[in-house]
Image (cartoon, grey):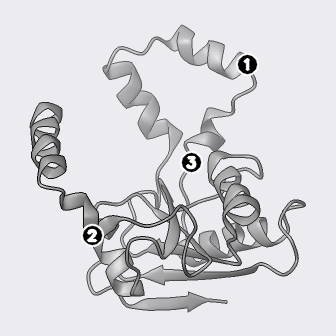
Amino acid sequence: MIDQIIEFNKSFVASKSYEKYLTSKYPDKKLAVLSCMDTRLTELLPAALGLKNGDAKIIKNAGGLVISPFDSAMRSLIVAIYELGVEEIMVVAHSHCGACHMSYEHFHHEMIARGVKEETLDTIRKCGVDLNHWLEGFKDTPESVRKTVVTIKTHPLVPADIVVRGFIIDSETGELEEIE
């Protein structure tokens, strides 16, 4: 698949198809969106939000979560605020998310089946990584959104004037529901 993508890329560049996507690194709408990496949202999310290339910084991970005040999602938001002029943040989870009910227990069995040694997992734990927490999903999507919004709003490096709001998008229709 990657070889096919590389071949496509050569023709994309040669035909200058990139020209319609040219923009600066600064989001025109001063907006960042934290959302899930779900494939259903690849085109649906920006379309349903009315966003075009250059409008917003879109940060995606499994579940659209900030799982730690100093994880990569939070780091990206901090950079977006201080370096790129972001003034508003939308946390957008979605219906029927695979991260809902995700657990380390499930991953543990899959890892062992794919050749990861129990000793490797023990070494990771000894380095201070809580695999149960790190690979845990959530049980309640609205509560997960609330928790992520609060984590961002109360982060010591996020200025008080940054607007942070949470939503759940229907992964079929694109309809947004705001979570208070």
Q: Which image quarter: residue 152?
A: bottom right
Amino acid type of disc 1?
Cys
Q: Is residue 62 visible?
A: yes
Q: Earlier in the sequence, mark 2 or mark 3?
A: 2
Of labels 2 and 3, the one closer to you: 2
Drawn side of residue 99 relative to residue 173, left or right: right
Q: Compared to 23, does 87 lie above or below? A: below
Dot 3 and dot 1 residues touching (CB under 8 Å)? no
Distance between mark 3 and mark 1 Cα atoms: 18 Å
State the mark number for residue 20: 2
Q: Position of residue 56 (x, y in %)?
A: 51, 72
Q: Residue at x 84, y 81 (%)?
A: 161
Regarding mark 3 in the picture, which secondary structure is present there? loop
Which residue is labeled 1 in the image?
127
Regarding mark 2 in the picture, which secondary structure is present there? helix
Front residue (pair 107, 127): 127
Q: Compared to 29, does 63 lie above or below? A: above
Of labels 3 and 1, the one closer to you: 1
Q: Earlier in the sequence, mark 2 or mark 1?
A: 2
Q: Which image quarter: residue 178?
A: bottom right
Drawn side of residue 6 relative to residue 113, left or right: left
Amino acid type of disc 2?
Lys
